[in-house]
Amino acid sequence: MSRKPISELRRGWTTGACATAATKAALTGLWGDNFPETVGLTLPRGETPKFKVAYTAEGNGWAEAGIIKDAGDDPDVTHGCLVRARVRKIESGVKFVAGEGVGTVTKPGLPIRVGEPAINPVPRQMMKGVVKEMAARFGAGEGIEITISILGGAEIAQKTWNPRLGIVGGLSVLGTTGVVRPFSCSAWIASIHRGIDVARATGTPHVAGCTGATSERVVQNLYDLSDHAMLDMGDFAGGLLKYLRKHPVPHITIGGGIGKLTKLAQGAVDLHSGRSQVDFKALNEMASNIGLPDISRVNTVLEAYEIAGEPLAALIANKALVRVKKMLVDAPITADIVLIDRAGKILARASEDQKESG
C-alpha cells in the first residue's frame, strides 16, 4: 500500500499554539464572567485556528484552562496531551513559570537562558500578545504570571532530546509558526542544531552523530562521550554536517550501519530508505578497483561485506570520511567514521590521522 501524498495529511498545532490558546481562555476566565468553549488565535503566518477548551479551573486570584494538543497526522509524542495555562495577576510584566511536565533550561546554548522555563521565544511572544490583547479587551493591567503545565510531560520528555540538551523536568513548549506539518523533518533537524549549540556553549570538544541506537551506543562507549555530546543525527547527515560547517565543534564522529554509511559514502545526505538507495553497481566498481571479489549480484551491503570482507568495510569507511570532509569544506573540524554491523560489531574505522579497518 502506498503512502498518501503529503497534501492529504492533516496538519496540527504546536505545543506553543496550544499553550497560547489555553492562556487566552484562562485570561477570559480570570477577567470575564465565564470561560469560553472555544478560543481563536492568529498564528505568526496568518492562520486562524479555533481551539476547543477541554479543561477549566479557578481559585482565589487565578484561573486555568487547558487545550488538548492535536498534532494532526504527524507522529508527535505530545499528540493528545493536555496543555494547561494558569494565569495570575502580578504587579507588572509577563512572567513565565514551568508547571508540571514543563522543563527548565540547565545548559547554555539554547535560545532561553539557564534557569528559565523551557518555553521558546515565539510561544512567549504569542502569549505576551494575547495578554496585551485581552488586557485591552477587559480594561485590565498587563501584569500576568503564566504557568504552563503538560500532563505526563516529565515521562514523555524521556522520549525526546530534552535530557541531552540540558532541559530537565519535562517538555519544551515549542513552535515557530504554530503549525505542525505532517512528517516534516524540520523539527528533527532543529533539534540537531540545538544539540550543536549546546555542545559549543558548554565547550564540548568531541560530538558524535549516529544513524541509530546501536551505533550510538557503540560510539558513546568507544569514546566515553557524555549524553549531551551525542547528536541525534538519525538519517539527517546533511542537516548535521551543514550546520556544523558554520558552527564548528573541534571533532565529529559519524557512526552507523554499513548500509547507511555506504549511502553517505556515495553522496547521499538523507539516509532514509525511502529517500536514498545504495548504488550497487557503483559499489561493485569501487570494490573491483582495489581487487576485491565480484559483488554485483548482492541485495544488501551486509551481503557484500560477507563476500568481500574487511577491506570492503574499510573502503566504505574511508569513502564516507572523504564525503564528510567535503561537506565540512574548510571548517576547523577533524572527523572520523565508525562503521558497524547490525549487532554492533565494529567493522571498520577511518580517521584523518589513520584510515584503516578496525
Image (spheres, rainbow, N blue to C red):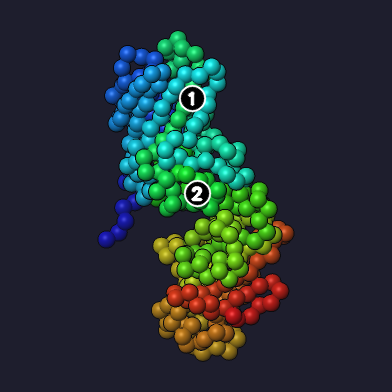
Give the numbered dot on residue 347.
Answer: none
Image quadrant holding the N terminus, namely bottom left
Q: Position of residue 312 (x, y in %)?
A: 55, 82
Give the numbered dot on residue 145.
Answer: 1
Q: How many marks?
A: 2
Q: Amino acid at mark 2?
A: Asn
Q: Is residue 21 visible?
A: no
Residue drawn at (51%, 51%), measured in percent from left and top? 163
Q: Secondary structure at mark 1?
A: strand
Q: Position of residue 112 (x, y in %)?
A: 58, 38
Residue identified by numbered label 2: 162
Residue drawn at (34%, 33%), measured in percent from left and top? 67
Between residues 300 and 138, which one lies in front from this camera angle? 138
Q: Are marks 1 and 2 in contact (CB under 8 Å)?
A: no
Q: Amino acid at mark 1?
A: Glu
Write down the quadrant of residue 81 in the picture.
top left
Q: Is residue 241 visible?
A: yes
Q: Residue furthest front?
A: 60
Between residues 40 and 268, which one lies in front from this camera angle? 40
Q: Position of residue 188 (x, y in %)?
A: 48, 51
Image quadrant holding the C terminus, namely bottom right
Write down the quadrant of residue 320 in the picture.
bottom right
Residue drawn at (49%, 32%), measured in percent from left and top? 97
Write down the quadrant of residue 69 in the picture.
top left
Point out the tag, 1 or 2, that comes first from the N-terminus: 1
Which mark's residue is nearer the viewer, 1 or 2? 1
Q: Secondary structure at mark 2?
A: helix
Q: Position of residue 300 (x, y in %)?
A: 43, 77
